[in-house]
Amino acid sequence: MKAVILSGGSGQRLAPLTNTITKQLLPVANKPTLFHILDLIKEETQIKSICIVVSEEYGHKVKESIINSEYKKHFEFDFVFQDKPLGLAHAVQITNMHMGNDPFLMFLGDILIDKGELKKAYEQFIKNKPESLVVLKEIEDPRPYGIAEVSNGKVLKLVEKPQEPKSNLCLSGIYFFQPSIFYAIANIKPSYRGELEITDAVDFQIQEKKSVEYYIIKSWWFDIGTPENMIKSNEALLNKLAKNNINSKFNQSVKIQGVVCIDQNVTIEDSEIIGPAIIAKNSYLKGCKIGPFVSLGENVYLKNIKLENSIIRENTKITNVMGIISNSVFGKNVELSLSDNLKDLTKTNKTKYIVGDDTKCTSL
C-alpha cells in the first residue's frame, strides 16, 4: 500500500503567513504540518512509499525539506508537480503511474488529526477492502466542506460544499482508495468551479454500486487553513505533551508550571513559563510570562511581554508590548518592539497579531 499527500494550494486564508511559504510547511507545535502527517503514517500504517503532489511555486521548498529530513530514511518519496490547481481528483489522477495497481491513502497536507484515528481507518480499509473509504468528522457547520450522507456503514452520497447540507459529516481530507479510483476520475467532468472534484469521483463509484465505506473521527481534527485553526491545533498537540523535557538550566528567578519542553541553549531570566509550552533552542526570554499553549521556534528573543495561545516562528524578536499577546501567529524574522515607557505588564487587555515573515514594526 502507498500514500499520496497533496501539498499544493495557495493558502490564501493564511495570508500573510503564506506569502513566503506553503501552508503545509507552516509549523504547529514547532513542526511543519506535513511532518506531523508523516509521523502518523509512519507510526500507524505499514506504508513505505509516498508520492507528494506539490505546486510549481513552492514545490521545490517542500521537496528540499523532505530530502533534508529524517523521513528520507523511512520512506521512499516521489514528487509530482501540479501545474495548475485543477482539483483534488486531478491531483490524484497525475499520480497514476506512481500508484500503479496498489491501493493507497490520500491525505490532504493541511489536515491534522489526533493519534490513533488514522490507524483505525487504515485497519478497517485493510480488513474490508472497499473500493473507497472516506474519513469523516462530525462538525457544526459543514457548508465549507464536502459532506457525506451515510447509512448502515455505507456512504449513500457525497456533496461538495452544499448550501443546505443534509448531513453534518464533513469529508476530513483523508481517503483510502483502491486503484479503481482512477477509472472513476476518468469518468467525471469538471465541476462549476472548473475542477475535478474527488467527491464526484467517489460519488461515481457509489452510483456504480461499488462498496464505499466510511470511518468517523472520534477525537479532534483540524483543517489548518486559517490562523485560528493553526492555534487550535497547536493547543491540541501541546496537550499531548506527557512530561517535562528541560535541557537548559535556569536560576531561581524562573518559575515553571505545567508540562514544558525546553531545548538546549535557552536563556530565561525573571520569567514565568506556564505549560503546556515548547521553547526551541537558542531562545532568550527576560521579564516575560509565557503560556499556556505557546510554541516558540529557534532563536526567538522575548523581553517584557505576556504571551499565551500563540505560535512564534524562528528568529523573531518581540519586546516591550503592553497587555497580553494572545491567539497570535508570528512568522520568522519578525521584529515587534515598543518603547520602554509602554511596557506596562500589569495591563490585562488581549491583542491578536497575525504577522508575516520579515515584518518590522517598532515604536520610538
Image (tube, rainbow, N blue to C red):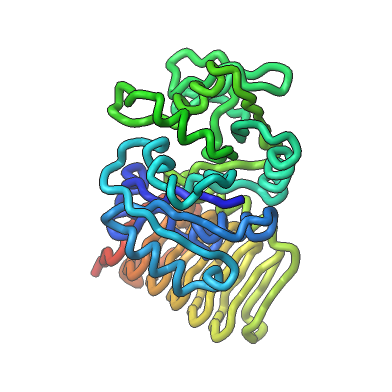
Q: Let me know if residue 136 appears in the view.
A: no
Looking at this view, is 158 or 283 the one in front?
A: 158
Examine the rendered structure and indicate whether residue 328 appears above or below residue 344: above
- Determine which quarter of the picture holds residue 248: bottom right
Q: Position of residue 168 (x, y in %)?
A: 58, 22
Q: Residue furthest left?
A: 364
> Looking at the figure, which quarter contains the C terminus?
bottom left
Examine the rendered structure and indicate whether residue 357 appears above or below residue 16: below
Q: Residue furthest front?
A: 101
The residue located at (44%, 45%) in the rendering is 96
Looking at this view, is 30 or 293 the one in front?
A: 30
Looking at this view, is 144 or 357 the one in front?
A: 144
Q: Let me know if residue 247 appears in the view.
A: yes
The residue located at (68%, 44%) in the rendering is 122
Examine the rendered structure and indicate whether residue 324 appears above or below residue 338: above
The residue located at (35%, 46%) in the rendering is 9
In the image, is 279 to the left or to the right of 303?
right
Q: Position of residue 137 (x, y in %)?
A: 61, 32
- Determine which quarter of the picture holds residue 47: bottom right
Examine the rendered structure and indicate whether residue 352 appears above or below residue 175: below
Q: Position of residue 210 (x, y in %)?
A: 60, 23
Figure disc tally: 0
Q: Position of residue 242 (x, y in %)?
A: 74, 63
